[in-house]
């Protein structure tokens, strides 16, 4: 039991990140609908962001604002750097999602469906070697 | 005070980003300016990169602190021999492709010129950024900028390219996420993101499982980006259905820059000593051998020229990774260390750039995609086809072309490393290259035009010369002639001091 608590509960943030990541990965691999694939991709990326955010957390840490009084009282800070990194990574993830969604819109106009298997089927009718 | 040249690493990135915005704004007023701005930017970037290379070779590495922040906290741009060399190759091919695109884009993407050049400049920004940066998180951001522009450019032709681009997007994002996770693991044990700082902090932690896991995530993530064999599935469609100059950039540069990122992570963040303690590079050699054989066999089975070239890129990434895998065991002068992989990065950019641009020329002039339709093309477009033949012979490895030099040095390196299995693999791959390129050359020059007897007039029509415009022919011939010129230069050992400097940066090679 002690082992269980030490491995699972004490490091629950890592377990949540791994589980979320695998849920996202499952969505990407198993779902046929392209929008669901994008949602899976988002969960996958968000899991990694959560990992970074939990890295920066410090038990009892305050917001990292430089202030005379806080320094004097000897408070500890949360590490701000992972948060800043993840702000950048969120922007990247939003951009990826935007490009992916715009591709899906164009595919819907082109093939009239957003199911991957149906798109492959429609491409197959013209032969996969078809040029456009 | 920094000298002017020491400001160039950051300027190369900034100029390109500003030019992307400028193209977009001036495009509202006059659409024709887009190409001129793009070409002028790339030309100035290319000249800057030559100055940087010269400075690095004569004076030493350039370190540029962004915003004046001291390195472990601030972002740093570092130019050493390795990235100066890669930057020159990247901007050269970028320049050649943009010159080629002037006529081709009007044909392939009518009325999309302005957005094409805007995204193209963003792509160049991302590629330059990956190359110059000395901060690993910064590298991740630039990898994503590059990939996002690449997705958009691949999708620009519409139809089947949309599906290809979507597949690339999903796989590429997973690769980038793995890279980010690797960064997170390294950050959690070292608390640093600066590449130089990491290389100092990591050695005491080499046995740590977090560090090993980080390394594995870096390898897998970047292997997706560089289309190493079992993870290559996105590549053929994406490279085949993009516009011609983007295919050339994708095959010639983008996957190579991912390889550069891999080399940077493997040898700068980690070190040769770390790699020697693990069997990773041996596994990479075997994967690369599989990539070479399977890529070539799949290339033979293709009927579409651009798809065939795309599978050939999978095989060529195999060469680069094989050379990389041998780099820590082979040490003798002309082929030791990173030399063969560095050579093949340049050589593949020249050869595959030329071949994809020629494939684009066939599409431009006659809308020909399938190899069986190339009958009589040798007489119809003699100069284009001659360039194709030179680049194809170079791919097969006829001396003194660049392909011959790469293969020769990889074979010598594998003999020195006592990994004799790879010698027959390389010889077999030359044979397979011969099969699939000869098929194209044979169709172009030797097969007769259909219906020769019945419809004599149509035959005459087919034999009329219809060359592509000079603006497209000149870039093709520059690349084709460099395939031979560079081959002679490599054999004469003229660029060897540069490669020795790259090796000495990482403590590789060394025995003259």
Image (spheres, grey):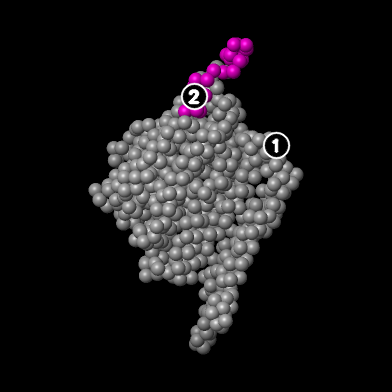
For the question of whether residue B65 can be seen, the reply is: no
Q: Which residues are magenta?
A: B438-460
The residue nearer to you, when weighing B350 against B171, is: B171
Residue A83 position by quadrant: bottom right
Residue A72 placement (x, y as % from top left) = 50, 87
Q: Secondary structure at mark 2?
A: helix
Q: Secondary structure at mark 1?
A: helix
The residue tagged 1 is A125
Q: Is residue B357 left or right of residue B57?
A: right
Which residue shows up at 48% across the image and 70% down it?
Answer: B188
The residue tagged 2 is B442
How many marks the image carries: the answer is 2
Q: Confirm whether circles 1 and 2 share one chain.
A: no
Which residue shows up at 38% across the image and 40% down it?
Answer: B424
The residue nearer to you, when weighing B377 against A1, is: A1
Vertical relation: A123 (above or below) B280: above
């Amino acid at each position: 039991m002690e082992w269980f608590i030490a491995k699972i509960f004490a490091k629950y943030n890592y377990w949540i990140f791994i589980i979320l990541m695998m849920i996202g990965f499952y969505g990407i691999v198993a779902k046929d609908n392209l929008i669901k694939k994008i949602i899976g991709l988002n969960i996958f990326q968000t899991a990694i962001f959560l990992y970074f955010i939990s890295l920066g957390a410090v038990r009892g840490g305050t917001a990292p604002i430089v202030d005379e009084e806080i320094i004097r009282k000897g408070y500890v800070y949360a590490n701000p750097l992972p948060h800043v990194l993840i702000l950048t990574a969120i922007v990247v993830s939003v951009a990826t999602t935007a490009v992916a969604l715009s591709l899906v819109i164009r595919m819907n106009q082109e093939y009239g469906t957003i199911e991957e298997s149906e798109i492959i089927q429609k491409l197959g009718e013209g032969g996969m070697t078809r040029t456009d | 005070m920094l000298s002017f040249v020491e400001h160039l690493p950051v300027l190369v990135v900034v100029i390109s980003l500003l030019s992307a915005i400028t193209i977009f704004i001036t495009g509202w007023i006059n659409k024709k300016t887009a190409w001129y701005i793009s070409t002028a930017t790339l030309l100035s970037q290319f000249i800057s990169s030559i100055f940087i290379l010269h400075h690095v070779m004569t004076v030493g590495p350039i370190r540029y602190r962004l915003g004046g922040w001291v390195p472990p906290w601030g972002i740093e741009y570092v130019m050493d021999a390795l990235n100066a060399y890669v930057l020159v190759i990247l901007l050269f091919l970028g320049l050649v492709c943009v010159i080629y695109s002037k006529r081709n884009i009007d044909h392939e993407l009518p009325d999309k010129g302005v957005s094409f050049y805007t995204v193209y400049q963003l792509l160049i920004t991302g590629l330059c950024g990956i190359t110059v940066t000395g901060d690993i998180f910064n590298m991740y951001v630039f990898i994503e900028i590059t990939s996002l522009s690449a997705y958009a450019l691949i999708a620009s032709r519409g139809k089947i390219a949309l599906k290809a681009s979507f597949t690339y997007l999903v796989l590429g994002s997973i690769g980038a996420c793995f890279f980010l996770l690797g960064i997170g693991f390294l950050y959690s044990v070292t608390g640093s993101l600066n590449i130089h700082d990491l290389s100092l902090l990591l050695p005491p932690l080499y046995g740590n499982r977090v560090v090993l896991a980080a390394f594995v995530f870096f390898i897998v993530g970047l292997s997706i980006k560089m289309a190493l064999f079992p993870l290559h599935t996105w590549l053929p469609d994406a490279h085949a259905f993009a516009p011609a100059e983007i295919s050339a950039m994708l095959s010639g540069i983008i996957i190579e820059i991912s390889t550069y990122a891999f080399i940077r992570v493997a040898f700068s963040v980690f070190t040769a000593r770390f790699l020697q303690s693990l069997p990773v590079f041996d596994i990479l050699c075997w994967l690369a051998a599989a990539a070479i054989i399977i890529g070539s066999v799949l290339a033979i089975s293709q009927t579409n020229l651009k798809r065939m070239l795309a599978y050939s890129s999978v095989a060529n990434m195999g060469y680069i990774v094989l050379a990389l895998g041998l780099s820590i065991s082979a040490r003798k002068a002309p082929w030791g260390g990173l030399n063969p992989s560095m050579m093949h990065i340049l050589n593949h950019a020249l050869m595959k750039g030329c071949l994809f641009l020629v494939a684009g020329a066939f599409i431009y002039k006659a809308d020909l995609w399938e190899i069986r339709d190339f009958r009589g093309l040798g007489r119809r477009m003699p100069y284009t086809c001659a360039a194709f033949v030179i680049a194809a012979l170079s791919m097969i490895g006829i001396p003194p072309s660049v392909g011959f030099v790469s293969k020769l040095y990889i074979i010598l390196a594998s003999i020195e490393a006592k990994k004799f299995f790879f010698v027959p693999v390389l010889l077999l791959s030359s044979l397979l290259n011969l099969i699939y390129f000869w098929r194209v050359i044979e169709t172009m020059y030797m097969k007769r035009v259909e219906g020769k007897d019945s419809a004599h007039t149509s035959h005459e029509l087919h034999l009329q010369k219809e060359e592509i415009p000079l603006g497209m022919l000149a870039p093709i011939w520059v690349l084709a002639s460099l395939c031979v010129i560079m081959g002679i230069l490599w054999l004469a050992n003229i660029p060897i001091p540069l490669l020795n400097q790259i090796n000495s940066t990482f403590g590789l090679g060394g025995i003259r």
